[in-house]
Each structure stands twice: as C-alpha cells, then as structure tokens.
C-alpha cells in the first residue's frame, strides 16, 4: 500500500488543480476557499474526535457486518470449483473482448475492486480503466492436506483463511497479523509474518499462481514450469503484469496453542544482540523459534516475544492461557509493554487464532490515534467489540484534507532492511520521527540470483555465512503513528524526514513496502528495485501498453514530496 501527481494532467505539487490560477484569478480564490474548508474540517476532526467517534464507531461496525454478511451469502451460494471456473471464464471473456477492440480504444486493465476496499494508502484512479470482474473471487477452493497447500481466490482475507484453516489443524506458512488484508493483494505485492525468520517473504510460500493475461489467455504459473520467469516477476508487481484469479499457498500443521515467551531487554546493544541471536541471523544451524518479533518502546527498552506450537498438556505447566484477542482484553502492544515496565519475563499459552490476529483490534497501535480512550478497561468491556474501525469504511469516508493528514501528521511505513543495519536504522528512525513503539520482524531474504524479481538479492556482506540455499537475515521495521514533534507541536517537516530515511534505505539495500506513501522519485524507485525481469515479462506476456506500469500503480495520487515539504508548527516556534 510517490512522488508524481496522477497521470491525468494534475500539476505537480498541486493535486487536483487546487490553487491553479486563470487569467482573472477566480480559480485561485476557489482553491484557497476549498483548502481553508478542508483545513477547518481536519481541525474539527482532531479536536472533536470523541463526539465524532461516538457516531462513526457504530456505523463502521454495522458497515463491516453488512459487507461480511454479503460476502458470506455470496460464498454460500457459489462455493464450488465449478463456479470458480465460471467466474474465471468471465474474466477471460472481458479481456478477450477488450483485445478485439482497436488498439486506440483499449483502456488499461485493472480489477473492479473499489479503492476503499484496499489497504493501500493511496487512491488509484480507475474511472478511465477497463475494470475486470475479480471482486467476486473470494472463495477458498481446496485444502490439500497431503501436499500441505491451500488453493484460494485472490479476495480471500487473512482472517477468513485463518478461521478456515485453524479448526482443520493448519495455518498459512506466511500470514499477515492484520486480518483484513487479502491474500491476492499480499502475493502480488508483499507480505510477511513473525514466522518469516523461517520461511521468508510470502512469495516464498507460493506454490502456483493462476493468472489471466491481457489477451484473455489463462496460465498456470509455477517455479519449475514453462512460465518460471513470470513466477519470479509476479511478487511486487501490484497487478502490472497479469490478472490473478487463484493462488496456491503452503500451509503448516499446528497445535492448539502458541507457547509465547515475553523477554524484556534493556540497553540498545543488548536489544540488537538478542534479536540477532534469537533469529539465528549469522548461524544457519541455529535452533530458532517458530515465531519471533521485537517491540521497541524506546532505544533502550524492548520486549522480545517468541514461541512455538504447544498442545497445553505438559504436566505441572504453570503457564496461563491468555485469549488475548477477546474484545475486553488489553491491546496487544500494551500487554507486551507491561512486561517491560515490570522488567520480568513471562510465558503464556495463547490460542493460535488469537496469536495470529493479535494486532487486528488495535491495527497495531494506530487505533490509539483515533480512539485515544479505546484501551481503557471500561471502554473495552462495554464497546471493545466495536473495534477495529472498518478499514474500508475509513477509506470510503476519506476527504482530501484527511488524506493529507495521513502523510503530513502520521507515518505508516513498513520497510525491510538488512539485519546488519539494524542499529543505524533505529537511530535514524528516532532522529527522523521520534515515534514509539517500533516493530521488528526478522525475515529471511533468499538469494535467487541477479535479475530474478523486483527486490534485489542480499549483498555478499548481508548473507548468512554457510547458508544453503543462500539467504540473508533482514527485518521489517514497522513505523506507525504520529511522530513525536507532531504530538509535541514542535517544528516538523514530514517530506524531509521521510526523504532522509528513504535515502538511508536505498543506500543500505532495503526496500519499502509499496502500499504506503512513497517519498521517492521514479528514478530513485528504479534504483531501489530491479525492474529487469519485470520489463521482460511485460513484453513477453502482453502486459506492455495493456496494464498500468508498476510506477503508475504504486505512486501516490498526491505529490507527497512537494505537498509534504512544509514545516508544521513553525508559528509555535516563532511565538516562543
């Protein structure tokens, strides 16, 4: 979920034409009035959010119930491989009909999924595109227990897959801790989990893709099949190569609980050392846990949480069962922080589904910005079942003013970096944003060879010595929330802060997840990502001129670099 304006004639740095002058100056006046109205709306939103949330929370809950019921009913009426074939044929028919049109009449191909139904922060304009009917592809088609794989359509969410698999004794080999993400969106972009120190990114758990090309041709894409080049190019392609209609993913067997250890660590050096040792960053033979993550509450305080599957039948076991995803339970990160405050380790038995979806209720810790009283015990017991705010509802009601708020006064970034750069990353993140907590997920990144996908392979000094196949231990740095200067209302320039951090990411050999607002130019984007194979596949598989380019898909509809290059709270500094 960039730098340039949308490819619709919008002037760079002036989204939607706001503030553009004509010969008599009227447009400028209208632009100023619109901007002033939006600014007032945002101030009201910030100052009266308690009252507004009393209205929005129930509406969001009902909206989520309606969408879930509609999807469940549709799935009940059409949950069979035969109907899958019919739906895929409808996709093929639309694309074949488009291909039969004169070249000049063919519109670029996109899914018919509504903008507000995706987790991407940007709003990609589909109004002038050929929208293909894929939003009805939300069925789980087959669990193959012998091969330990599950076949799903692209609109199946992590939450739906988890609730299907856990009662059957399995989970996805790679999942997202936020249940509303779709599996199709993850495999065509990127996804990872606290199990990634074992499996790597979600693309490493894909067995096969089923895609439809721009000419309506249907392909079964595997690592060792005739379309192996496309297999490596589809991850991080964001729908710029083909239309995904099904994906087969690896699953792993589970037990009833996750035996979770909470280990508080003090001291910056000790924190980084503990993370590296626990994930076996430099030792390919190290025994590593099934799950591992670190939550940093400051540069000097963190809690390492790790564990594996457990049936809960160990004699004399004193570990308590904690169903931490229940509506009345403390938000996950606040529960973790208690171990840091007490400076005492602990062990719990957590039901598998509760563990996997532990970040959903609080959307990691972002929900605190919207519902600051949401973790109060009284609110949790009385209204905790209303959370989280439905993401599609939030995007559906987003105005341009609120959209600017998402990158001017908040940060939502996931950035993968080599483990060798962890200290520098945390130090620079502190300087740029002073935002806590930070989330760290260790993750293997495999070296498949040069030019074997959009992400560049680990550099020689980033590889784990003796590992075969070759891999380097990276980590996902989750940066979510309001920067410290924004909370303190001290001067802060969002674009300069993000640009400074992204420059470090580029030099370190890291890569930002592209669902977020991208504070880099197209040239810098091509320096961070290797588009060699992607370009070859664009030509070979008829995507060139038919699907939007990767840059067109991931750049923000707002020129975040120019719009965000503004020092907030400068007046307060002058007054002092």
Image (cartoon, rainbow, N blue to C red):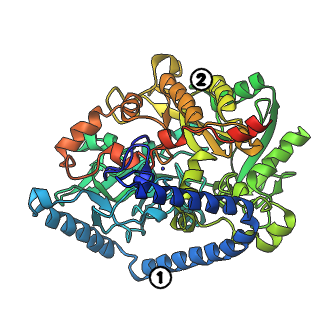
Q: In the figure, is residue 100 to the left or right of 270?
A: left
Residue 150, position in %: x, y? 44, 59
Estimate the x, y position of residue 387 in percent, counting from the top left.
69, 67
Depth check: 454 or 434 in front? Answer: 434
- Residue 166 appearing in the image: yes
Which residue is at a point 51% across and 23% down the rendered structure image?
A: 508
- Residue 455, located in which quarter of the rendered image? top left
Whether residue 296 is visible here, answered yes or no, is no
Identify the residue at horizontal 48%, vertical 57% (top origin): 29
Measured as percent of width and height from the top left, residue 302 is found at: 77, 36
Residue at far front of view: 24
Of 34 and 522, the residue lying toward us: 34
Residue drawn at (82%, 70%), measured in percent from left and top? Answer: 381
How many numbered marks are there? 2
Which residue is under mark 2? 421
Is the residue marked by circle 1 packed among few (<14), some (14-19), or many (20+) residues within 10 Å? few
Image quadrant in which you'd find residue 526: top left
Q: Secondary structure at mark 2?
A: helix
**Does residue 150 lie above or below 409 as drawn?**
below
Mark linked to residue 73: 1
């Amino acid at each position: 979920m960039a730098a340039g304006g949308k490819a619709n004639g919008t002037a760079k740095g002036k989204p939607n034409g706001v503030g553009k002058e004509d010969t008599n100056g009227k447009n400028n006046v209208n632009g100023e009035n619109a901007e002033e109205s939006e600014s007032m709306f945002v101030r009201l939103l910030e100052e009266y959010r308690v009252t507004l949330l009393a209205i929005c929370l129930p509406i969001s809950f009902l909206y989520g119930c309606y969408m879930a019921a509609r999807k469940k009913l549709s799935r009940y009426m059409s949950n069979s491989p035969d109907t899958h074939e019919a739906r895929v044929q409808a996709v093929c028919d639309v694309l074949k009909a488009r291909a039969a049109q004169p070249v000049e009449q063919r519109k670029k191909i996109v899914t018919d999924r509504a903008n507000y139904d995706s987790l991407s922060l940007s709003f990609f304009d589909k109004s002038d595109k050929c929208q293909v009917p894929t939003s009805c592809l939300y069925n789980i088609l087959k669990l193959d227990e012998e091969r330990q794989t599950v076949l799903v359509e692209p609109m199946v969410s992590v939450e739906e897959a988890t609730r299907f698999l856990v009662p059957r004794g399995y989970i996805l080999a790679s999942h997202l801790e936020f249940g509303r993400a779709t599996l199709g969106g993850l495999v065509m972009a990127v996804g990872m989990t606290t199990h990634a120190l074992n499996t790597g990114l979600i693309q490493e758990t894909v067995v096969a893709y089923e895609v439809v090309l721009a000419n309506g041709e249907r392909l079964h894409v595997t690592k060792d099949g005739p379309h192996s080049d496309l297999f490596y190019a589809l991850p991080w392609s964001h729908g710029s190569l083909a239309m995904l209609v099904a994906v087969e993913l690896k699953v792993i067997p589970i037990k009833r609980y996750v035996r979770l250890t909470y280990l508080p660590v003090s001291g910056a050096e000790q924190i980084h050392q503990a993370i590296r040792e626990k994930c076996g960053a430099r030792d390919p033979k190290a025994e590593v846990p099934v799950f591992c993550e670190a939550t940093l509450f400051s540069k000097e305080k963190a809690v390492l949480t790790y564990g594996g599957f457990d049936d809960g039948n160990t004699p004399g076991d004193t570990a308590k069962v904690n169903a931490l995803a229940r509506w009345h339970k403390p938000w996950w990160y606040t529960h973790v922080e208690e171990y840091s405050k007490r400076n005492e380790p602990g062990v719990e038995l957590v039901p598998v589904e509760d563990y996997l979806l532990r970040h959903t209720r609080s959307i990691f810790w972002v929900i605190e910005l919207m519902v600051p009283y949401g973790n109060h015990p009284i609110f949790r017991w009385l209204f905790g079942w209303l959370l989280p705010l439905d993401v599609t509802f939030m995007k559906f009601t987003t105005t341009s003013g609120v959209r600017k708020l998402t990158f001017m006064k908040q940060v939502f970034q996931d950035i993968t970096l080599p483990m060798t750069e962890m200290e520098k990353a945390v130090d620079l993140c502190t300087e740029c944003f002073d935002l806590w907590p930070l989330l760290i997920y260790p993750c293997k990144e495999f070296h498949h060879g040069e030019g074997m996908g959009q992400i560049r392979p680990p550099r020689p000094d980033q590889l784990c010595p003796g590992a075969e196949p070759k891999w380097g231990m990276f980590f996902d740095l989750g940066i979510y929330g309001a920067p410290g200067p924004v909370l303190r209302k001290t001067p802060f320039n969002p674009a300069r802060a993000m640009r400074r951090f992204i420059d470090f990411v580029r030099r370190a050999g890291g890569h930002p997840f592209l669902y977020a607002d991208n504070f880099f130019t197209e040239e810098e984007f091509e320096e961070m990502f290797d588009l060699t194979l992607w370009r070859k596949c664009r030509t070979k598989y008829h995507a060139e001129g038919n699907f939007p380019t990767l840059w067109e898909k991931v750049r923000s509809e707002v020129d975040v670099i120019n719009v965000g290059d503004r020092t907030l709270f400068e007046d307060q500094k002058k007054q002092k």
